[in-house]
Amino acid sequence: MSDREKIIKLLREGERFNLVSHQLPDGDNIGSLLALGEALERAGKEVQLFVPGGVPRRYRFLKGSEKIQPEMRSGQDWPMVVLDSSDLERTANFQEQIRQAKIIINIDHHVTNERFGTLNLVDPGAAATGEIIYLLLKEMEAEITRDMALALYVAISTDTGSFKFENTTPRTHRVAAELLEYKLNPAVISQRVFDERPYPFFRLLERALAGLELHHGGKIACITLSSAMLEECGALPEDLEGLINYTRNIEGVELGIMFFIESPEEVKVGFRTKTVDAARLAGLFNGGGHPRAAGCRLRGRPEEIKERVLREAAKLLEEGSRSDKESDDARNSESQ
């Protein structure tokens, strides 16, 4: 019996579950959590939902989001279903409680997933964990409500950048089309999730763009923000979401980087790329993610971290350039 079959059997036969996801939550982990949670509740299960730090403002319109708890106080002996987390470190203050569970179900789509579960359902070919959850629920013949469909549509649309990232596949579009059959309004969803941002976000964006730097002949763009800047702008950590995309969107830039100085000795680094492997770059610093979006967390002096990261980023771009040139030379020699 495969892990997928075992997971379905356990979800059908089990009575109590903890559903957990990663810190700095996004639409995929919130949407996946809510959809699977409602499906299990409707099947008569007792369910608790947890996300470090709670639910960001932009996703609180999703029904059931008020049930998501920022701290785990009870039920640690229940099976742990960990969603959208490539490793347990991403679950922050929940990781030790998860490790103590007898059963850990790991459901994720990151190519760098460490397969930390007792049972693992990891599909790097899925655009989002929400896509996996939808297909899993269909296989379980679970009833899907409009609220569940909305949560899953938000999960998939956010992790695909509104279906414009290259992780978007024909299957992704088919799943999204089936979800839209539940009388969802994509225009309203897009407005709430992608377009509307609180005023502090724009103050933060102003600070980020004011410090924008170009490196490596304009192929690398980076911005630097800090906890102090968040406080000065009246912003929250969730307001950082999306800022890094402004670096990648610059013409000629192949690699965008955001340095977020959480403390004088700790920096969170995000990568967004057009062609090079962001997950490979993050992996050099014990991070992970996707080929075009990845990140890591480093301890040390921010100036030294920035220098190290930019040095490795430049090396990766150089390797890519040499590889492209060798491929071109090989094609030219074959055609002669």
Image (cartoon, helix red, strand yellow):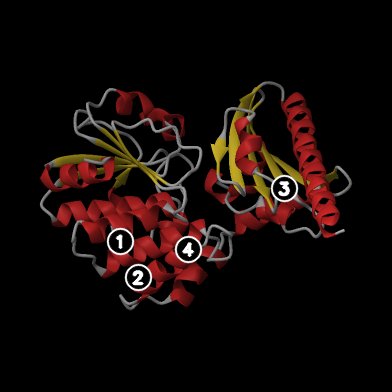
Position above or below: 105 against 55: above
The residue at 46%/58% (across/down) is 58
First-in-chain label (3 vs 1): 1
Q: Residues within 10 Å of mark 1 (few under 14, many from 20)?
A: some
Query: Which numbered mark, 1 or 4, is in the foreground of this view?
Result: 4
* Mark 3 and mark 1: Cα distance apart in space: 34 Å
Q: Helix, strand or loop at disc 4?
A: helix
First-in-chain label (2 vs 1): 1
Residue 42, located in which quarter of the rendered image? Answer: bottom left
The residue at 33%/35% (across/down) is 71
Q: Residues within 10 Å of mark 2 (few under 14, many from 20)?
A: many
**Do the residues under discs 3 and 4 have CB atoms within 8 angstroms?**
no
Of the residues shown, which amino acid type is indicated by label 3?
A: Gly
Residue 157 image label: 4
Query: Which numbered mark, 2 or 1, is in the foreground of this view?
Result: 2
Circle 1 is placed at which residue position? 63
Q: x, y percentage for residue 195?
A: 57, 67
Q: x, y percentage for residue 65?
A: 33, 54
Quadrant, the N terminus: top left
Of the residues shown, which amino acid type is indicated by label 4?
A: Ser
Quadrant, the C terminus: bottom right
Circle 3 is placed at which residue position? 256
Residue 180, located in which quarter of the rendered image? Answer: bottom left
Of the residues shown, which amino acid type is indicated by label 2?
A: Leu
Circle 2 is placed at which residue position? 179
First-in-chain label (1 vs 4): 1
| Horizontal side of residue 195 vs 156, given as left or right | right
Q: x, y percentage for residue 115?
A: 39, 33
Q: Residues within 10 Å of mark 3 (few under 14, many from 20)?
A: many
* Mark 2 and mark 4: Cα distance apart in space: 11 Å
* Mark 3 and mark 4: Cα distance apart in space: 21 Å
